[in-house]
Amino acid sequence: MGVVEEITLRHTVIKDYEFRRIVIPNSIISEDTLINSSIKDERIRKHIDIGIAYDADLELAERIIREEIQRHPNHIDVRSAKEKESGEPSVSVKVISLGDFSVVLRAFVWTRDFDTSVELERDVLRSIKLAFDERGIEIPFPYRTIVFKDKGREGSVEPKG
């Protein structure tokens, strides 16, 4: 991922975000899918996914996510006058999956460009985590239950503890 610096008949040079130059033969570029995030649009939409515990207050979590994003200076409110008048939120937060360990929420956020969206995401993930901690909303982590069976056989492994 980076910015295209040069295109020649044989290769394309991309400067990545660590300022390294990546030289890609054009034969590879013509056979692969490219995502161009540097074409200038007035704005882009960023998806920010956050998992919460199944027993967490879903509406509170959605509200916290929405508030933290709206507070960020890189957030762009793209609502029409009619949507603002009707009270539509400027950040949409939806449940996108019921995972093995969490309910996954996705915030749909508008910002100026790709670089700005990365900065916004880093900042709001931190502020959302802190707000969740303050209000008792758990961000779960995967766990495993291990069952040891002992059928009285020789050589069976006994759990220590």
Image (tube, rainbow, N blue to C red):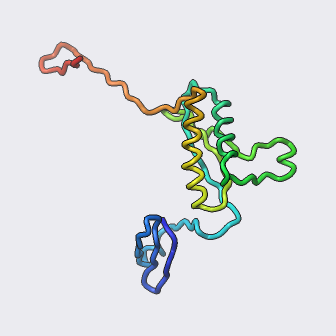
User: Going 68% across and 35% down the picture, which residue do you hit?
Assistant: 63
x, y percent for residue 51: 54, 37
| Residue 6, image x, y percentages | 49, 81
149 to the left or right of 6: left
Image quadrant containing the C terminus: top left
Residue at screen point 65% across, 69% down: 40
In the image, residue 41 above or below residue 146: below
* Of residues 2 and 116, the one drawn nearer to the viewer in this rendering: 116
Above-or-below relation of 44 to 97: below
Number of numbered discs visible in the structure rendering? 0
Q: Is residue 93 above or below residue 5?
A: above
Task: Give the camera-side residue of 53 and 29.
Answer: 53
**Quarter of the image where one finds residue 69:** top right
Q: Residue at x 56, y 55 (%)?
A: 118
The residue closer to the viewer here, 33 or 133, is: 133
- For this rendering, which residue is in front, 49 or 77? 77
At which x and y percent is residue 26?
45, 78
